[in-house]
Image: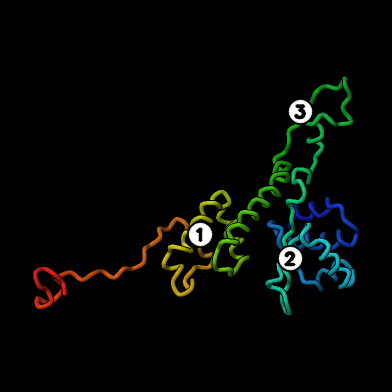
Amino acid sequence: MSIAATKWAWLQDLPPTAKLVLLALADHADDWGVCWPSLSRLVSMTGLSRSSTARALASLDGKLILRDRSKGGVGHSTRYQLMMEQSHPETIKRSHHDTVLEGNDPTVTPNSPTVTPKQSHSDTQTVREPSKTISCAKSFAKFWAVYPKKRAKHAAMKAWRKKGVHDQADLIIEDVKRRTKRDPEWTKEGGKFIPYPSTYLNGKRWEDEITPGNVAARPSSQSLPAEDVIAGQIL
């Protein structure tokens, strides 16, 4: 469960049913805002009917959540992405220190001595973490859109975050585009040998050089029988 996602969900101005479903999703979300509870699980958590839950999900789709149904169907759950960028991360936590620093502390009178309290490290962490999470999610989405082998997305997401490659996103994406066109290992046999995206990321494959395809060398005169060589020309 992501505390940032839950706080974000509480801040949304929604009808009661939709907000209840959004809170249930946030309760399952990871730090990326990704979750995949089944419809039955959401019904159990909210106490709503299946039809009411489904209508609430439909009302949230494209506004506060994105639904990926590619993994849906019998025995599979739809994957949800909470669109936490819709809110302002800096408003998630407003401590008493923040209020004093802005000069809005109602307990301070004009004759009160000026006091500048220290803002704790934990407060700073709470404010910045959602913004960083959103940026990583966006850069990964761009990487996933261009990567030709769409396999093991969740493993790729974990590798993207673990390697901390958000700042190198543009470099990695350009490398993927270049390899898709020029790397013989990626182009032969319909892309059969393209590595899984998580393998590419964990191995830092964008740092590898692209090896040109093997070109059959023209035989030299020294490697041929004498009778096949006339006046220095190869027959």
Q: Residues within 10 Å of mark 3 (few under 14, many from 20)?
A: few
Q: Residue at x 11, y 68 (%)?
A: 232
Q: Position of residue 51 (x, y in %)?
A: 87, 72
Q: Quadrant of residue 47?
A: bottom right
- The image's colour scheme reads rainbow
Instruction: Please name the residue that numbered disc 3 is placed on.
Output: 116
Q: Residues within 10 Å of mark 1 (few under 14, many from 20)?
A: some
Alpha-carbon span between mark 3 and mark 2:
46 Å
Q: Quadrant of residue 230?
A: bottom left
Q: Quadrant of residue 224?
A: bottom left
Query: Which numbered disc, 3 or 2, marks the residue that appears first in the sequence?
Result: 2
Seen from this angle, which residue lies furthest top?
111
Disc 2 residue type (three-letter): Arg
Q: Residues within 10 Å of mark 2 (few under 14, many from 20)?
A: some
Alpha-carbon span between mark 1 and mark 3:
52 Å
Label 3 secondary element? loop
Query: In this view of the protein, which residue sits in the foreground, 218 or 24?
Result: 218
Task: Choose mark 2 or mark 1, whichever is in front.
Answer: 1
Instruction: Please name the residue that numbered disc 2 is placed on.
Output: 67
Alpha-carbon span between mark 2 and mark 1:
27 Å
Instruction: Please name the residue that numbered disc 1 is placed on.
Output: 177
Task: Choose mark 1 or mark 3, whichever is in front.
Answer: 1
Q: Position of residue 99 (x, y in %)?
A: 82, 34
The answer to whether mark 2 and mark 1 are in CB contact below 8 A is no
Q: Position of residue 96 (x, y in %)?
A: 82, 37
Is 117 situated above or below 217? above
Query: In this view of the protein, which residue sits in the foreground, 157 or 171?
Result: 171
Is 200 situated above or below 77? above
Disc 1 residue type (three-letter): Lys
Q: Name the quarter where the N terminus is drawn.
A: bottom right
